[in-house]
Amino acid sequence: MTLPTIDHIGFLVPDLDAAIARWSAATGYTFGPIARFQAARYLDHAGPELRLQEPRITFSVEGPPYIELMETTGLGTHDEGQLGVHHLGFRGLTDLGRQLQRLDAAGLGHDGVAFDAADQVVLFFTEPAALDGIRLELISPRPGLMLTDDRTREYPRDPVTGRVDFSAFDPSSAQPTQSA
């Protein structure tokens, strides 16, 4: 199976606000609002228990591929030891359980899996060591909630593509339409 075109390139940063300023100055890109991607049932090498994973993120308006900036959080796949280029994101994929098995069989392994309430895989990362330090992130159309930074509202998603409408709460601004 051939993966779709790269949707975004994810970078893990220690301070999201400072990173937005640096990346905007360096590239001239505009970044959308800061949001929180919420995976309520997430599992990675940090431990054997499912937990909440809720990184603060933003996407460039320019793309694809978009630039995703994510702030470090806790332990595991998004901790401070993972700074820099984090992953190449591929969105809108179906049957991620089968995709995970296929990539495991190809020797890529996995580290970082989000499950929905029915225990279906909705997002996962491959092991970084398998591809020279870079993860692949495979994302279903409905991977989890995308909340405003203050966690008071959920951004709407296109029901078919899963793209998030970041302009929903500020229609006058140019915002990316993206998915995490």
Image (spheres, rainbow, N blue to C red):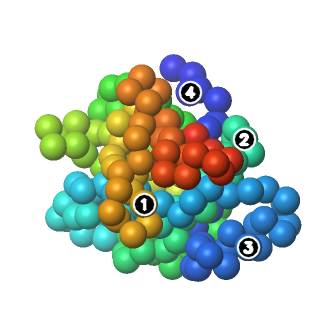
The mark lying in front, picked from 1 and 3, is: 1
| Lower sequence index among marks 4 and 1 | 4
Q: Residue 3 has which mark? A: 4
Label 3 secondary element: helix
Is 55 on the left or on the right of 63, as rendered? left
What is the secondary structure assignment of the residue under circle 2? loop
**Residue 58 falls in image quadrant:** bottom right
Q: Residues within 10 Å of mark 1 (few under 14, many from 20)?
A: some
As shown in the figure, which amino acid type bears the numbered disc 2? Gly
* Tag 2 residue: 63
Disc 4, disc 1: CB below 8 Å?
no
Q: Gap between marks 2 and 3, in whole Å? A: 18 Å
Residue closest to the eye, 115 or 159: 159
Q: Is residue 155 above or below residue 22?
A: above
Q: Position of residue 166 (x, y in %)?
A: 53, 48
Q: Which mark is residue 21?
A: 3
Counting residues from the start of the chain, the first of labels 3 and 4 encountered is: 4
Task: Tell me the residue at 65%/51% (across/down).
Answer: 173
- Asked if disc 2 and disc 3 are in contact, CB closer than 8 Å, the reply is no
- Most extreme residue toward the left is 118
Q: Are marks 3 and 4 in contact (CB under 8 Å)?
A: no
In the rendered structure, which amino acid carries the disc numbered 1? Thr
Q: Amino acid at mark 3?
A: Ala
Which residue is label 1 attached to? 148
CA gap between label 4 and label 2 equals 18 Å
Tell whether label 3 touches label 1 (CB within 8 Å): no
Q: Residues within 10 Å of mark 2 (few under 14, many from 20)?
A: some
Above or below — where is 141 with respect to 27?
Answer: above
On the image, the x and y values in percent for residue 107 come to 46, 41
Rounded to the nearest angstrom, the CA distance separating label 2 from label 1 is 22 Å
Can you tell which quarter of the image residue 153 is in?
A: bottom left
- Give yes or no for contact between labels 4 and 2 (Cβ–Cβ under 8 Å): no
